[in-house]
């Protein structure tokens, strides 16, 4: 197949940029091998071994000692001739090699390029490419093994099974009875719905959801952030307004990763700011604006309130400016500093529901660690609200694109089931639409 890669080789930095013992640069494309050989002055190498330790020398002098491996098109995962170059890690060696390759007509491209090439040559489907992309970034073992299963084709196989059943139902629509076609469509619809139910967990595993810690200054947000991470990452101080820029770190619970974000917080409306220096006030306003932006972007919000304030007046806890941004389903009210309360005060707070009755409320002490386990569980429940059939065992939906197509597919299957109840042959347009959708889910064709 004459593709771009055959005509114009390119290279990618497979390993993450930065310092490391080894960096791997891949040169993809038929002409790549002959270009790389121009960097190898060793005459013995002309006998062309598949893998060798060699000195690389470019236009500006020595580049590095490298292990060079030639993977022919038939064996490479892209379906194209590939040269894998292992050099010492670090920006200097990599920079010199990339520069030398560029001068030989081998430009540097993005890390996704080989996978996209594999998609073009039919070695991978789009679902597998999506899984591979996310696998590079996986932060928990559970997420990595889930994504590896999808990379190996679990979800593609599940969608392919649905696709085959849709095709059979479409054929049956021309000859079978109304009841038979209707029953088949209903069964397909159930399979699609089951697959869609895996999305919450699949999406949560695939990428760490943003989980913001919000609330007024000094309620203990940074203390809670540190306690949940179990490292003193953010600065804690009795003085209000210590945190300004937001600070973020990946955390996880039950193998579900989330990006915990500590914010400056949002002060109560009407708070007295007289006497504040104009510069301080400007910084505080910028920090508040950033906090609100973080709340807006977050999938889950933890609204921290001071237990003593709650005990004093049960409703004056979360500023209205913050409540406006709350998605009641995906937020948790965290009553912090309960170590400072007596038993009677604790009881009063435990019975109150703030600020929405539907919101989960957890009582904690960032100082003593009390209640932190319940808080971690509450975060997981907020991330994965329903308890779906766990996709760890098999196929799972894991990108917004897949969910979008699956919703359309479900709708088409439902319409087909309804149409089949009236007339078997009437299901054909809906089934055809469903077939196109199922194919586009696997192959990424426009629908
Ligand atoms: N007693 C008690 N003090 C706490 C607790 N959490 C935080 N603090 C204190 O409250 C003050 C403000 O904490 P900080 O985390 O900086 O609050 P932030 O402004 O919301 O980030 C500090 O003096 C902390 O030591 C807690 O659970 N119990
Ligand atoms: Mg803080």
Image: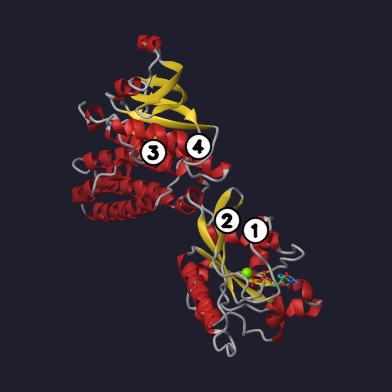
Do tag 4 and tag 2 residues touch (Cβ < 8 Å)?
no
Earlier residue among tags 4 and 2: 4
Between circles 2 and 1, the one closer to the viewer is 1
Q: Which residue is mark 1?
A: 233
Tell me, for residue 387, which label it has, or none: none
Between circles 2 and 3, the one closer to the viewer is 2
Tell me, for residue 249, which label it has, or none: 2
Name above or below for residue 369 compared with residue 341: above
Name above or below for residue 86 compared with residue 138: above
Mark 2 residue's CB less than 8 Å from ligand 2: no
Q: Position of residue 30 (x, y in %)?
A: 27, 24
Q: Quadrant of the N terminus?
A: top left
Q: Which residue is mark 4?
A: 90
Q: Position of residue 103 (x, y in %)?
A: 30, 32
Earlier residue among tags 2 and 1: 1
Q: Is residue 95 visible?
A: yes
Q: Nearer the viewer, residue 208 or 163?
A: 208
Q: Is residue 71 left or right of residue 142?
A: left
Crowd class of label 2 (few under 14; some 14 to 19; many from 20; radius 10 Å): some
Q: Nearer the viewer, residue 286 or 334?
A: 286
Earlier residue among tags 3 and 4: 4
Earlier residue among tags 1 and 4: 4
Q: Secondary structure at mark 3?
A: helix
Inter-mark Cα distance, 3 to 4: 30 Å
Residue 238 location, quadrant? bottom right
Name above or below for residue 239 compared with residue 294: below
Do tag 2 and tag 1 residues touch (Cβ < 8 Å)?
yes
Earlier residue among tags 2 and 3: 3
Q: Which residue is mark 3?
A: 128
Crowd class of label 3 (few under 14; some 14 to 19; many from 20; radius 10 Å): many
Q: Position of residue 178 (x, y in %)?
A: 25, 48
């Amino acid at each position: 197949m004459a593709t771009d890669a055959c005509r114009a080789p390119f290279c990618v930095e497979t390993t993450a940029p930065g310092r490391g013992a080894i960096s791997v640069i891949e040169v993809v494309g038929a002409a790549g091998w002959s270009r790389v050989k121009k960097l190898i002055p060793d005459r013995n190498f002309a006998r062309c071994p598949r893998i060798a330790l060699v000195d690389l020398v470019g236009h500006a002098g020595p580049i590095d000692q490298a292990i060079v491996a030639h993977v022919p098109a038939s064996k490479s995962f892209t379906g194209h001739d590939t040269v894998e170059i292992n050099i010492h890690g670090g920006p200097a060696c990599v920079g010199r090699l990339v520069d030398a390759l560029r001068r030989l007509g081998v430009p540097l491209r993005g890390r996704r390029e080989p996978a996209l090439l594999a998609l073009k040559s039919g070695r991978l489907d789009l679902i597998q490419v999506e899984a591979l992309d996310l696998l590079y970034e996986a932060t928990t073992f559970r997420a990595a093994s889930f994504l590896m299963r999808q990379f190996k084709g679990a979800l593609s196989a599940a969608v392919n099974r649905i696709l085959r059943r849709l095709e059979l139902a479409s054929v049956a629509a021309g000859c079978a009875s109304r009841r038979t076609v209707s029953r088949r469509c209903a069964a397909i619809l159930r399979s699609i719905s089951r697959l869609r139910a895996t999305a919450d967990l699949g999406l949560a595993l695939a990428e760490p959801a943003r989980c913001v810690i919000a609330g007024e200054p000094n309620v203990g947000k940074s203390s809670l952030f540190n306690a949940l991470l179990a490292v003193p990452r953010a600065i804690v101080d009795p003085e209000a307004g210590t945190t300004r820029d937001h600070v973020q770190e990946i955390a996880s619970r039950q193998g579900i990763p989330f990006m915990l974000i500590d914010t400056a917080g949002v002060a109560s409306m009407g708070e007295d700011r007289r006497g504040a220096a104009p510069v301080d006030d400007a910084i505080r306003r910028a920090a508040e604006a950033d906090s609100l932006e973080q709340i807006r972007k977050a999938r889950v919000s933890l609204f921290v309130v001071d237990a003593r304030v709650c005990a004093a007046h049960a409703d004056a806890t979360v500023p209205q400016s913050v409540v406006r941004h709350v998605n009641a389903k995906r937020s948790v009210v965290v009553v912090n500093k309960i170590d400072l309360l007596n038993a009677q005060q604790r009881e009063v707070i435990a019975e109150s529901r703030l600020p929405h009755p539907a919101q989960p409320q957890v009582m904690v002490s960032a100082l003593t660690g009390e209640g932190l386990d319940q808080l971690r569980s509450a975060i997981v429940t907020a991330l994965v609200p329903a308890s779906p059939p766990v996709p760890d065992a098999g196929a799972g939906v894991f990108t917004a694109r897949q969910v979008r197509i699956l919703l359309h597919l479900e709708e088409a299957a439902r319409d087909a089931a309804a149409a089949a109840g009236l007339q078997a042959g009437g299901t054909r347009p809906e089934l055809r639409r469903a077939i196109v959708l199922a194919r586009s889910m696997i192959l990424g064709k426009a629908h």
